[in-house]
Image: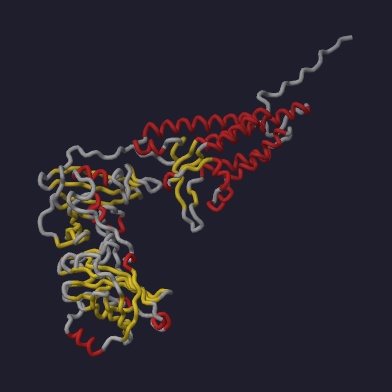
Amino acid sequence: MQFSPPRAWPRPPAPSARVLAFGALALWAMSLALIGFVLYAEQEQLRGIEILATGWLSPLAGNFAWYANPLFLWSIYCLLRGRPALGPTVLAVLLSLDTLRFSRYPLDEGGGATLVYGYGWGAVLWLAALGVLASATGTRQIETRLAAGSAKGSGEWLRPTGFGWCLLVLVAAAYLAAHDRRHANTAELERLSGLAFKRYPVCGVEDPVVAQPLVNFAGTLEVTLPEASRLSGASPFDRPTALLAWGVPVVRVAGRDYSYASAGTSTVLTSVPASSPPAATLAVTVSDIGGSSKIGATLIDESAKRTVFDQGWQMMIGGRYCPDYSTYPDENQQPRKLLAAALGVQGPPPGSAAPIVRQRYPTDNTVTGVMVGRIDPIKSAERRDSQPAHSLVSPSPPENLLRPWNRNCPAAVGWDAAGSVASPVRPDTGAPFMVGERAFYHPQRRNDYYALCAGEHAYLYSGSHRERGYELAIEKRRLSDFGVAWSGYVVINDQELRSKRQGRLDLEYVEEGTDGVAMGLIEQGTDWSAVVKAPLQLTLGPR
């Protein structure tokens, strides 16, 4: 009688499903501590734990990758309990692939969003953890088949596929990380710190450097802009106040020379028609190349007839330019850094004070006004007859927009709210106050201010009905330099004003005295008037 040897059972594959499940869980936990995504908005970094806490809202952005997490944890639980997890694992892996489609991160409930700048190593480990989970699930299927003595089983392909997916994720991330760092410029390298790789192509063009700059530029810089520059993205070159703040002494735009002038103890922005030739010209262009905007700037030294720089900035995906370009740059950002270096200037020119930014209203001189009577119609008529009619008004039709901005002002004096050719309204200056051909710009760009001219001065005022009464902001400025003689804020707490009057109140006259001012007010569109006395302190500036 012949005996056959005992049958040798196949050994389960190593590592086991339990070991692989613990490995997947460890990678997943590590990913929570690392950076998952970096956003374009302020280069904000989102760690894995933050994404885990808020990602359940991702369907609002049309993405469902976050929901791989609960399926992942359920699969790990099943594997550690010795149970199969084929269904939830496959679904988790499929959902995780939606990460590659995640490009916009919502910022608020109003629909605001920012693009995803790049992926962190947390995202890489998270995807790798899903691959290890797939291998663990495939291994469990093999272990179950061997334990049952079955000839074949389903889902065993997940073991090699998971290992392959994990290897592909790690190799691809390492390659992209090395590629980005090899081709990125200095600014991109700083932004890539702590990241695996950028979602879009990196910028490899370094910031421009001026070889032969001008020295202590002290003349006029003429800026030529493309047509409709306010709509073409030429900022900050289309803002005279920005260039002046960078240290340019005089900026010429559209035939007018902008500069800061002394006005008593402060400075004021003013412009006059261009007269002398410029010392340098800056030609700005905006074009569209391949569907993206490109800004160009060429600086010419007019005395030597040489090109100081000829630089371009191409917009990339995400709204950034290559190389970096900011519409509101500080001293270390382009294009301010380039232009300041080329002109040899830094900050406001020597000897000139930076413009004083005042409060919206002069609340440091707030007083209570008291109504003491009505304007004498006979004196009012005499006063009007002795004063010139106002000459400048707000924009032309539609007629319901026509409002008188100036009272008793001589010709060519007062607010030019329309922005004529002689006194352009620029986006950074607002409506100018004209004195002949010279334009003055209010520090706060108060386009809702009105003017009452009186000799060599103008009273600028703006009022509105409030809960506590009628509030009137008033300034007295000199026509010679637009300097402030005094300013104040008058609160008229009167029952009649609060209950019966709703229209705008215009100044008819202002009489100054040792105890304050008396103001004649008339309601726009009616014959109602009032005389208000207010104990304003009239010593805030040179008279």
- The N terminus - image quarter: top right
- Image position of 377 (left or right of 115): left
Going by the image, does 513 lie left or right of 503? Answer: left
| Nearer the observer, 262 or 400 | 262
Question: Where residue 514 sits in the image (x, y, percent)?
Answer: 24, 74
Does residue 274 lie above or below 132 as drawn?
Answer: below
Percent from the top left, x then y, of residue 396?
A: 27, 75
Q: Position of residue 184 (x, y in %)?
A: 36, 35
Taking the spot 64% from the left edge, 29% from the top edge, the residue there is 20
Where's residue 470, x and y in %? 37, 76
Q: Residue at x 30, y 61 (%)?
A: 358
Total marks in image = 0
Residue drawn at 43 percent across, 82 percent down:
499
| Image-quadrant location for residue 402 | bottom left
Pick the residue in front: 168 or 354.
354
Residue 386, image quadrant: bottom left
Location of the C terminus (image quadrant): bottom left
Residue at image coords 73%, 21%: 10
> Which residue in the rendered view is the most extreme toward the bottom?
378
Question: Looking at the image, which residue sits at the far right?
Answer: 1
Q: Is residue 23 visible?
A: yes
Residue at the front extreme? 514
Q: How is the image coloured?
A: secondary structure
Rendered position, 17 above or below 318: above
Residue 288 vertical position relative to residue 130 in the rendered view, above or below? below
Q: Quadrant for residue 322, please give it.
A: top left
- Is residue 424 in view from this perspective? no
